[in-house]
Image (cartoon, grey):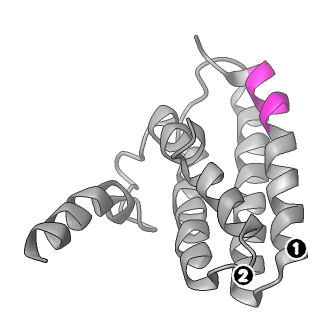
Amino acid sequence: MKSWLAMAAVAMVPVAAATVGAFEDKPPTIKSVMTKLHKGSQAEFSVLKAQAEAPKPDWDAIAKTTKDFVILGAALGKNDPPKGEKASWNQQADKYFQNSKALDNAAKAKDLAALKSAQKAMGESCKSCHSVHRGK
């Protein structure tokens, strides 16, 4: 049990470090946020999609996942874009954060339709940001 708790604590360090106000000096990088939330089948976005497709969604687990989106989504705008103008980056980062909050609000309300709608909006926003701001 202790080793499991220790592993869980280590795994949560990046999220814990990203609490509101904790990243004022140095926010998590865009790459670290995108990797944790979107890269691969074990990323939070994929996990959230699977959670939402479950016959009986585990709303506590979904709420934990959506909280990560809000915390890390708030950090995006604190970074400079790899390319493109800062004003455009700020708009895209704010859109991402708004989508993150919509995910979290749907989870809190246990509203599956709203959760899926927010997931769709977030997924559809990728290309508009990446085409203008994504680095290498």
Given the current orientation, which residue lies at the most extreme bottom position?
Answer: 109
Q: What residue type is labelled 1?
A: Ala
User: Of callouts 1 and 2, which one flags the residue occurring earlier in the amino acid sequence?
Assistant: 2
> How many numbered callouts?
2
Given the current orientation, which residue lies at the most extreme left position?
Answer: 2
Q: Where is residue 71 in the image (x, y as percent from the top left)?
A: 52, 63
Asked if the residue under mark 2 is in contact with the one under mark 1, i.e. CB atoms within 8 Å, the reply is no
Q: Residue at x 67, y 59 (%)?
A: 50
- Magenta range is 126-132
Q: How crowded is mark 2: few (under 14 residues within 10 Å), some or many (20 or more)?
A: few
Query: What's the CA distance linking mark 1 and mark 2?
Result: 16 Å
Of residues 87 and 74, the one drawn nearer to the viewer in this rendering: 74
Q: In which quarter of the image is residue 54?
A: bottom right
Q: Where is residue 20 in the image (x, y as percent from the top left)?
A: 46, 68
| Relative side of 28 to 129, left or right | left
Residue under pointer 2 = 56
Q: Where is residue 45 in the image (x, y as percent from the top left)?
A: 64, 51
Residue depth check, mark 1 versus mark 2: number of the one nearer the observer: 2
Q: Residue at x 70, y 61 (%)?
A: 100
Q: Which residue is drawn at 52% across and 55% down?
A: 72
What SS does tag 2 mark?
A: loop
Q: Please, is residue 96 above or below residue 98 in the view?
A: above
Q: Name the chief secondary structure element in magenta.
A: helix
Q: How crowded is mark 1: few (under 14 residues within 10 Å), some or many (20 or more)?
A: some
Residue 41 covered by magenta stretch: no
The tag on residue 114 is 1
Q: Quadrant of residue 5?
A: bottom left
Looking at the rendered image, the quarter that the C terminus falls into is: top right
Q: Please, is residue 43 above or below residue 29 in the view?
A: below
